Amino acid sequence: MKAVTWQGKRDVRVEEVPDPKIQEPTDAVIRVTSSGLCGSDLHLYEVLTPFMTPGDILGHEPMGIVEEVGPEVPDLRPGDRVVVPFQIACGHCYMCGSGLQTQCETTQVTGEGMGAALFGYTRLYGAVPGGQAEYLRVPQAHYGPIKVPEGPPDDRFVYLSDVLPTAWQAVAYAGVPQGGTVAVLGLGPIGDMACRVAQVKGAGRVFGIDLVPERLRRARERGVETYDLRSFDSEKELVAALQDETDGRGPDAVIDAVGTEAHGSAIAKLVQQGAAIMPRKLSGPMAERFSVDRLAALYTAIDLVRRGGTLSLVGVYGGMADPMPMLTLFDKQIQMRMGQANVRRWSDDILTYLTDEDPLGVQDFATHHVPLTDAPHAYEMFQKKQDGAVKVLMRP
C-alpha cells in the first residue's frame, strides 16, 4: 500500500509499505477514505524530529471502511463506516472508566513514561503506524472506532478523530460560564473549531487572536471578535485591548491553541532547531531532559486571563526545562487544565451536532482536499501557511 512516511526534518514521502494485517484478536483493518493533516503533524515535521525514525508512517485523523476484524471485536463488521480516534484505548481500565482515555493503562507507553499510544506519532507514544495511508491496522478496535452512518460526506465525520474532541475538551476545560467571555490564541484548525464550540456551548463573547489573515477572516465570518497580532506593538497593548472589552478584567478563560511553536522566542527556537539537526544518539536524550518550548503564547495567555480565571492548554507542549512564571500564576489564582483530548469521553455528545443543519460548520471546514500522493506538498504548504491552508484532508 501507499503511505506517508517520515524521512527527516521537513522530509515526508509517499512510499510503498507492507499492507497491515490483524495481529491481535482485538484488531481491525480499515480502508482509509479520508485522513487529516494536523498541526501536531507539523511538530513531527519540524520540532520533534529527535523522537522519530525514518520510515515512520504518519497521520492520526483517519476514517474509512472496515475490511477485517479480529475474533474479539464483536461490534464491528466488514463494510462498517468508522472514524478512528487518534489515541488507542482499551475502554475497560481504570483510566478509560474515568474518562481519561489518553491515559489508558492498557496502552500506556510505560517504557517512555508516557500515556496512551497514539497513531502516527513519535516513539514516545509507541511509534504506531498512522492513518495517512491506504489501509490502517486499528488496535483495541473493540472500543476505539466510532461507527457513523452512510450517506453524508466524510467531511461531516472525519474531525471526530481529533479536531472536534480536542476543541470540545479545550472549551470544557476552559470552564467558560454561560454568557461569559473566552479568548482563543491561535486560529488554526483547533483554535478555529474551539471558537465554534464555545459559541454553541453558550459563551457570550469569543475573541480570536492570530496573525494569519485567512484564519482571522474565517473566524470573523462566524461571529468571532478577531484581533490581529500584527496590529499591536507589544503584548501589553493586546492585553489592554481585551481588558477594555471585559470591564478592565480580561476574559473569563483563555484557550492556548498555539503550543510549542509560538512566534516570539528566538532563543527557544534556536534550541529546538539545534536539537533537530544533532546526531540521533545525542538529540533524543538531550530533548527528553533539556528540551524547551517557545512559550510566547502561554505567557500571553497568563497575562490575558482575568484574575481567578482559567487557562486551557490545547496546543502541544513538549519541553522538560521550561521556565514558568509561578509568581503570576499564584498571585492571579489562575486555574490551568491541559492534555490530549479523551476522544471517546466526548464523541457521543459531539455526534448530536453533526447534523444536516451543521451548526459547527464541519462540512466546509477543510480548505484543501488533496490526494495522498500530494502529501509532501501539503505538508510544506500547511507548515508555511501558504495558499490559505487552514485544514487539509487527504484522500488515498
Image (cartoon, helix red, strand yellow):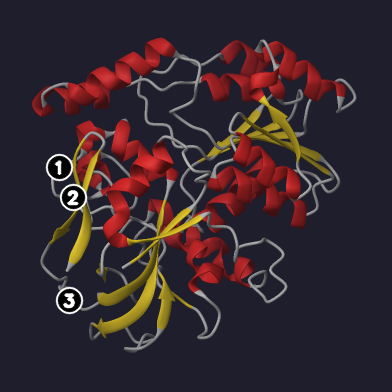
Can I make out residue 129 in this image? yes
Q: Which residue was labeled with disc 1?
A: 53
Q: Secondary structure at mark 1?
A: loop
Q: Secondary structure at mark 3?
A: loop
Instruction: Say which residue appears at 29% left-offset and 33% top-offset.
Output: 48
Q: Which mark is residue 56?
A: 2
Given this view, does label 1 or label 3 mark the residue nearer the observer? Answer: 1
User: What's the CA distance linking mark 2 and mark 1?
Assistant: 6 Å
Precedes in sequence: disc 1 or disc 3: 3
Q: Which residue sits furthest right?
A: 247
Instruction: Say which residue appears at 80% left-offset and 53% top-offset.
Output: 202
Q: Quadrant of residue 335?
A: top right
How packed mark 2 is, by other alpha carbons closer than 10 Å (few <14, some 14-19, many 20 or more), is many
Amino acid type, callout 2: Asp
Q: Secondary structure at mark 2?
A: loop
Left or right of residue 179, residue 346 in this image: left
Q: Which residue was labeled with disc 3?
A: 22
Mark 1 in CB contact with mark 3 (< 8 angstroms): no
